[in-house]
Image: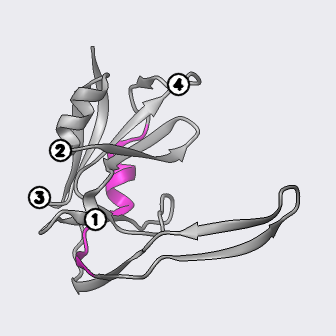
Amino acid sequence: MLLRSILIDPYRKSVRPLRIGAKYPALRKVICGSIQGIRLSKNEILYVHDEGLYIPAVSFFRLNGPIISYPQPLAGYGVVLGVDDQGESRDTEVPVELIRDNVDFPDLRVRKWTSGRTYTETHPILGEVSVIEGPKPIFEVLKEGKA
């Protein structure tokens, strides 16, 4: 069964409809690696490459619009799919134009990574807990680009 989805392609700087298989291997093939889901709404998920930031010469996109936004640039391809109440994939209900209007394609690279850190804080139920923050990317903008 093929589902209606939306492909965000930062290499071609395009956003277009895509018919995709409902199972994990089909999604992984389009993303070109392991996948991570980012919930856009109760019924829509954006899938991206889980380790895209570590890929040399990767292209980026940003959800940087008035309706849909995400705080960090995303590396590699993105696929928007619908999801039902049981977590199963289904056709997206988001219009391609909505995604297109909320995506841009900055020319970025990861300049360096911050150091991770560990600290303690007081949790209202658990008491004192250790918090481990992993390293975070620091981006360098080379030039801006819009779909």
Judging by the rendered image, the residue that carries numbered circle 4 is 84
Image position of 68 (left or right of 29): right
Q: CA distance from mark 4 to mark 2?
A: 24 Å
Q: Are marks 1 and 4 in contact (CB under 8 Å)?
A: no
- Secondary structure beneath dot 1 equals helix
Which residue is tagged 1? Answer: 53
Q: Pointer 3 and pointer 1: residues touching (CB < 8 Å)?
A: no
- Name the residue beneath numbered marker 3: 12
Report how far apart the C-alphas of labels 2 and 1 lie in the structure. 13 Å
Label 2 sits on residue:
32
Instruction: Inspect the image, locate mark 3, and give the three-letter code of the amino acid beneath it.
Output: Arg
Measuring from the top left, give residue 137's x and y in whole percent. Answer: 36, 76
Is residue 110 rendered magenta in the image? Answer: yes
Quarter containing the N terminus: top left
Dividing the picture into quadrants, the one containing residue 31 is: top left
- Residue found farthest to the top: 1
Please state which amino acid type lies under the numbered disc 1.
Leu
